[in-house]
Amino acid sequence: MADKESVGNTIKVALILCIVCSIFVSAAAVLLRPAQQANKDLDRKTNILAAAGLLKPDLSIDEQFASVTARAVDLDKGKFTEAVDATAYDQRKAQKDSALSDELDDDVDIARISRRVKYATVYLIEGEQGVEKVILPIKGSGLWSTLYGFLALDADLNTVVGIGFYEHAETPGLGGEVDNPLWKTRWVGKQVYGDDSGVALGVIKGQVDTTRAAAIHQIDGLSGATLTSNGVHNLIQFWLGENGFEPFLVNLKNGEA
């Protein structure tokens, strides 16, 4: 009779267990994928609505998001495009694809993202008079992580409606204060562009002096989180600048997008 406790039998049992477990794990991953994608989409919609100041706790997210239109933008041309499907396009995957993104020179890459996608999905709130709000995806490096978020602009395409970061790994109580509702409210009503060319909106060191004219473009820095504050400042400068959404916003304002 074969020795049930032999090395060969032990290895055989271990292999069988590994195979069975891998089958269960693979099956679970496949079965759960639709639910995971649904939760991911729900989270994205929630953050877009929150940034636009439209999130209402008494209505379903899908019902509220019915007023939002996703459109793909060619960042080089600053115009809407049908080159990609705005609802299915994955900007993170595109950044890793050399056919869908471009490497940035160090002097341009102030947001420290390495590569910039050629296309981006923006979200529009439209009314009888045209675009009422536009929500832009933004990202950039902080102290410990890449911050992913949305910035919403009013109909004039210059006034900030809201901002929110839905993913980051900054230090709680320091850089993590980008999630503080009070800090986020300080963005509301600020102006992106001034009389001069270029992006005037930014995060400063310390507190904003509200008696100065420049205050309309300035956000208080995060106390004890200089590098995270600098990261947010730089990503705003990049994505609202000439290498980001500025050409698109100019074309949209002029009815040429």
Image: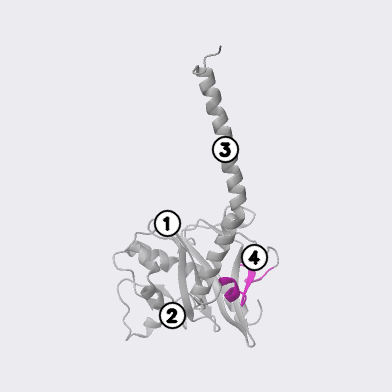
Mark 3 or mark 2: name the one nearer the start of the chain.
3
- Residue at (39, 55) in percent of width and height: 144
In this picture, is 171 found above or below 196?
above
Measure the C-alpha gap from mark 3 to mark 4. Answer: 33 Å
Between disc 3 and disc 2, the foreground one is: 3
Q: Secondary structure at mark 2?
A: loop
Rate crowding at label 4 as few (under 14), some (14 to 19) or many (20 or more) other CA atoms within 10 Å: few
**What percent of the width, then of the height, locates residue 26?**
59, 43
State which quadrant residue 72 falls in: bottom right
Mark 1 or mark 3: name the one nearer the start of the chain.
3
Measure the C-alpha gap from mark 1 to mark 2. Answer: 25 Å
The three-letter code of the residue at mark 2 reads: Val
Between disc 2 and disc 4, the foreground one is: 4
Q: Which residue has dot 3 on it?
A: 22
Can residue 248 be seen here? The reply is no
Measure the C-alpha gap from mark 2 to mark 4. Answer: 27 Å
The three-letter code of the residue at mark 3 reads: Ser
Mark 3 or mark 4: name the one nearer the start of the chain.
3
Q: Which residue has dot 4 on it?
A: 87
| Magenta-highlighted residues | 61-81
Q: Which residue has dot 2 on it?
A: 188
In this picture, is 99 found above or below 236?
above
Disc 2 to disc 4: CB gap under 8 Å: no
Disc 4 to disc 1: CB gap under 8 Å: no
Q: Secondary structure at mark 3?
A: helix
Mark 2 or mark 4: name the one nearer the start of the chain.
4
Where is the N terminus found, in terms of image quarters?
A: top right
